[in-house]
Amino acid sequence: MFGVYIICLTYFLFFAESTGRTFESRSYHYNLELFKEIGRFIKYRHVLGARAVLLNLVGNIVAFFPFGFFLPILHRKCRSFFYTVFFSFEFSLLVETIQLVSKVGSFDVDDLLLNTLGGALGCLIFYWMNWIRRTYEKKEKERI
């Protein structure tokens, strides 16, 4: 499942025309000012439309939920919240750098923040579901 997730994420981040990935005007685009793009999307939400705002802000968070969820499953060391957040940041930095170098999309520190937040939330969802599983297993043992 993690492999399928990575393939789908790669497609949407680098090739999907519906997310603005075109190869016509290939130039370097970047934002190094934290909250600049987030603020712009919120300020101009009426002009840009709800779809564009949700795609950028919520989409960046949701796109990294699975990363933060699967990482603790795949590697025991990543059951540490710190490690999962760190690797979410590192993976997001890799993606943003590839977008900058390949001139597909843009390097955006706001995306780094939102992607890392998504990874952290995915990890918290893993913790929550793991807690539910353990509670259920404990109740099952007590019944026997």
Image (tube, rainbow, N blue to C red):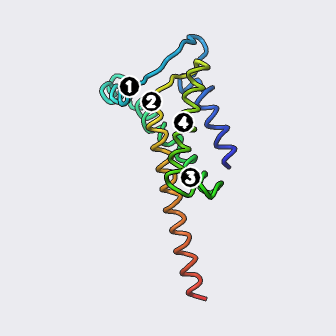
Q: CA distance from mark 3 to mark 4?
A: 15 Å
* Numbered circle sitting on residue 33: 1
* Numbered circle sitting on residue 92: 4
Q: Earlier in the sequence, mark 1 or mark 2?
A: 1
Cβ–Cβ under 8 Å for marks 4 and 1 = no
Camera-nearest residue between 134 and 50? 134
The picture places residue 11, in percent across and down from the top left corner, at: 64, 31
Q: Earlier in the sequence, mark 4 or mark 1?
A: 1
Cβ–Cβ under 8 Å for marks 3 and 4 = no
Amino acid at circle 2? Val
Single out the residue that lies furthest toward the left: 43
Cβ–Cβ under 8 Å for marks 1 and 2 = yes
Q: Residues within 10 Å of mark 2 (few under 14, many from 20)?
A: many
The picture places residue 37, in percent across and down from the top left corner, at: 38, 26
Cβ–Cβ under 8 Å for marks 4 and 2 = no
Residue ID for mark 3: 69
Q: Earlier in the sequence, mark 3 or mark 4?
A: 3
Amino acid at circle 3? Phe
Q: Residue at the spot x=50%, y=56% of the render? A: 125
Camera-nearest residue between 126 and 47? 126
Question: Relative to residue 132, is residue 15 drawn left or right?
Answer: right
